[in-house]
Amino acid sequence: MEKISRREFNRKWGQGITAAALMSSMPWACAMGNQKKSSASLGIALVGLGSYSTYQLAPALQQTRYCHLAGIVTGTPAKEKMWANQFGIPGENIYNYENFDSIADNDAIDIVYVVLPNSMHAEFSIRAAEAGKHVICEKPMAISVAECDQIIDACNKAGVKLGVGYRLHSEPYTQEVKRFVKDGVFGEVLYVSTEAAYRSTGNPGQWRLNKALSGGGALLNMGVYAIQSAIYSTGKNPISVTAQEFSTRPEYFKETDETITAQFEFASGAVANIMTSHNIWANRLKASCTNGWFELDPATGYGPLKGRTSRGQISFTHESQQKLQMDDFALHILEGKTNRAPGEMGKRDMIIVEAIYRSIAEENSKISLNLGNMGIV
Ligand code: NAD
């Protein structure tokens, strides 16, 4: 029987070789990492063991069915031991930022999940792709459209799959909003208002307030959720954007944007108003339609989310969004299911982010966008 390395498997899989043909020649199929999972469970390595990896992704990976925590990449030696003990990660699946590229030779790792400060997403996503691993890149996908292009190109070249950490596309309230829009349940969407914001009062030295590491302030961190909400609440990409910036605590927000509002126009005539901030608590989407309205509040937190419509409450059982998201991505690889948050979606959002910053720099001018259906899933 022909033997195929895991790296070659990932490349072929990314290029569309059928599961059945490959399964029969997978010598490691029953010997992958965590034995709690079925033989179809893919190994994930988390890169960057900060708060999101520690408190959301690692716990979620204890619940996933089609993927499991197989490795870690960290710059902090003390975390190596802690994570190895807590999650039973073998030494050969533990990397630092320098020796990370040798992950190419590790058949226990199928997916690299990049959970680092925003300015490091591109470098580590590209290195992961070049190592033949599928990639999940946290939001925002990168700090510029040019970097998003580099990530997408690297994944295409390596024949690996690319997903952005937009967990909401896998959770039921957001999916219900998308269904409302697709099926015209409340008629035509006329106006959308979205808010994704929190009040930051923590360490002024944190990377989110450092432009070189974050790429920007509230807009990159939370604003991408407000942009996303406006798009899935209308089902379309905007054709123009006009934006405004507000600053009330310049001594704290020295380098990064504090509060931004923006208005989107859509080809249908619909209008959206978005607000994002690192100075205000707000988390909501509301859509007014020809025959009613729908609302999520909170709309983008880790859940449970809450939903109401002009016809009453909507309610779904809460599950870890990260669990749903990572299993969806694994099933995209294993069974060719839809990639709910592909790289094009992350790039599209960065195009809008750059247009918003440009509008602000050009005295709130209206910036035209020509996105077609880019990133609409
Ligand atoms: P964090 O500050 O808690 O963790 C960052 C990690 O990166 C730490 O382990 C830190 O040691 C490491 N790191 C490596 N180089 C660094 C440097 N030069 N400066 C600072 N840290 C460095 O951040 P986080 O909240 O875990 O966020 C990480 C990424 O995950 C960000 O891109 C963020 O936008 C994203 N995130 C996504 C969600 C979501 O819901 N999808 C939620 C939180 C964070």
Image (cartoon, grey):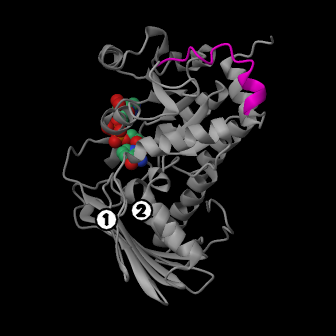
From the viewer's perspective, is residue 92 above or below residue 216?
Answer: above
Query: Which stretch appears magenta?
Result: 19-34
Residue located 51% across and 40% down the image: 327
Instruction: Mark 2 and mark 1 in contact? Answer it, CB < 8 Å.
Output: yes
Q: Quadrant of the N terminus?
A: top right
Give x and y (percent) for residue 187: 53, 85
> Residue flagged by tag 2: what amino acid is it?
Tyr
Q: Nearer the viewer, residue 203 or 180?
A: 180
Tell me the distance, in whole angstroms, between the alpha carbons under discs 2 and 1: 8 Å
How many tags in the picture?
Answer: 2
Residue 20: say if magenta: yes
Tell me what residue is drawn at x 36 percent, y 29 percent. 49
Residue 231 position (above or below residue 164): below
Q: Position of residue 85 (x, y in %)?
A: 31, 14
**Mark 2 surroundings: few (<14), some (14-19) or many (≥20) residues within 10 A:** many
Residue 177 x %, y %: 47, 69
Residue 169 in sight in this render: yes
Dot 1 corresponds to which residue? 306
Residue at left offset 63%, top offset 82%? 267
Q: In the figure, is residue 133 to the left or right of 313? A: right
Residue lying furthest bottom in this view? 290
Based on the picture, tell me whether residue 134 belongs to the magenta stretch: no
Q: Amino acid at mark 1?
A: Lys
Q: Which residue is tagged 2?
A: 173
* Residue 215 drawn above or below residue 46: below
Q: Residues within 10 Å of mark 1 (few under 14, many from 20)?
A: some
Q: Earlier in the sequence, mark 2 or mark 1?
A: 2
* Residue in front for this viewpoint, 23 or 252: 23
Please identify the dominant SS of the magenta region: loop
